[in-house]
Image (spheres, helix red, strand yellow):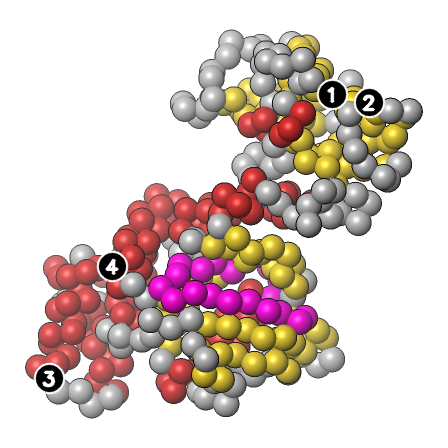
Amino acid sequence: MVSVKLVNINKKFSGTTVLKDMNLEVQDGEFFILLGASGSGKSTTLNIIAGLEKATSGDILFDDRIVNKMGPVQRGVAMVFQDYALYPHLTVRNNIAFPLKMRKASKEFIEKKVGEVSNVLGLEKYLDRYPRELSGGQAQRVSLGRALVRDPDIFLLDEPLSNLDAKIRSQIRVELKLIQENLGKTFIYVTHDQQEAMSLGDRIAILRHGKLEQVGSPMEVYKDPVNQYVAAFLGEPEINFFELTRNSNMYSSEEIILKGIEAEENEITAGIRPESIKLKKERDNDVEIKIKIQTFESFGSYSVIIGKARSGKEVRVRLAEIPEIKPSTEMAMYVPLDEIYLFGKDGNRIGKK
C-alpha cells in the first residue's frame, strides 16, 4: 500500500491558475474522493498524481518518495476513465491481458492473472465476448479489470461511472467498494456526484476553483461544513438559506426569527437542511417557519415538500413520515435551534475554526 501527499501544488495553464497551494494527504489503503463541480480542478489533480500532467510548482510524494520526475509507469499507478477505451477487435480476455502482454509476461502468468481478475469482477462468462457484445456496466468492469491485472500500488479513477444508467451505477458502486476493501489498495476517485462521494469515500476532499474547501469523512463534511459552499454542495434536497439582519437581541428575516445567537456581524446567513424541519414543535427554542405547500412527493421511505414562505422564498422539507398534506395548505413547521448553521458575509461558518 502507498500513501499520497501533495505539498504546495500549483498548476497554471497559459497563465491561468487551475490549482492553488494544494496540500493534501491520502492515506494507505484509503478510498479517497475528489469531489467538485466542473472546472474545480479535480481531474487536473488526478492527472498530476498520475504523472500525466506536471505541476507548475510543488511536490508529489508516494510514501516519502518524491515522484515529480517519474512517468505514470514508474509511479506504479493505474487509471480507469469515464470512457472505457477498450480495444474493439480484442475479446474481453485479451483486453484484460493487454497490459501484461505489453510487459512480455509469460503465457502461464497472464492466464493466471486474467482468471483471478475476471473472478473478482464476475466476468468469467464474458471472456470470449467482444466489447460490442457487452453492456455499459460489463464494459466498465473490463476497463477496471485491465487496471487490476497490473497490480498497481494506486488506482486512479476519473468519473468512471458517469456514462452508466442509475441502476447499473449503483450496482457498480457496491462492487467497487468491495473490490477496494478486498485489495486493500489506495483508490483516488474523481466525481461531481455527491451520492457517489458519500457512498464510496472513506474521506472526501471538496474542491472549488482549484482550491480545497474541506477534507473529512462523508458525514463530517455533511454535518459540519466549514462554509456555505460546502453546505450547499452536499445534500438532497439542497439546504435552505435565509438572509438575516440583527434586530436588537435577535436576528430575523421575513421567514424566521433567531434568538440567543452569538455573532458579531449585523447580517448573517442561516442554513437549514430539509431533514431538520419537523412538523411538530419538540423544544421551547425550536424555530418556527410558516410555509404554503406547493408540491408534495412521496418516495416510499421519505417524502419531500416544496413550499413557499410568505416572502415568496422557496423552502425545501424532507420528512421521514408520509403525512397527508394537500397543495396550497399553509402550515407552521419547526427547526431545532442547534441544527441551524450560521454563516458570515464571507461565507465562512460562524464559530467553526
Nearest to viewer (mark 1 / mark 2): 2
Measure how far apart labels 2 and 4 are at the Cα level: 53 Å
Residue that mark 3 sits on: 107
Amino acid beneath label 3: Lys
Query: In the visual, does 314 lie left or right of 94?
Result: right
Measure how far apart labels 1 and 4 are at the Cα level: 50 Å
> Residue 111 at what x, y percent from top left?
11, 76
Image marks 3 and 2: residues in contact by CB distance under 8 Å:
no
Nearest to viewer (mark 2 / mark 4): 4
- Return the residue nearer the eye: 102 or 128: 102
Q: In the image, which residues are magenta?
A: 20-41
Q: Secondary structure at mark 2?
A: loop
- Return the residue nearer the eye: 141 or 3: 3
> Residue 54 at what x, y percent from top left?
56, 83
Specify whether residue 24 is painted magenta: yes
Image marks 1 and 2: residues in contact by CB distance under 8 Å:
yes
- Return the residue nearer the eye: 262 or 201: 262
Q: Residue at x 68, y 36 (%)?
A: 341
Which callout, 3 or 2, points at the residue further toward the start of the chain? 3
> Residue 344 at what x, y percent from top left?
79, 43
Measure how far apart labels 1 and 2 are at the Cα level: 8 Å
> Residue 308 at what x, y percent from top left?
71, 22
Q: Secondary structure at mark 3?
A: helix
Q: Is residue 261 above or below residue 103?
A: above
Residue that mark 4 sits on: 182
Nearest to viewer (mark 3 / mark 2): 2
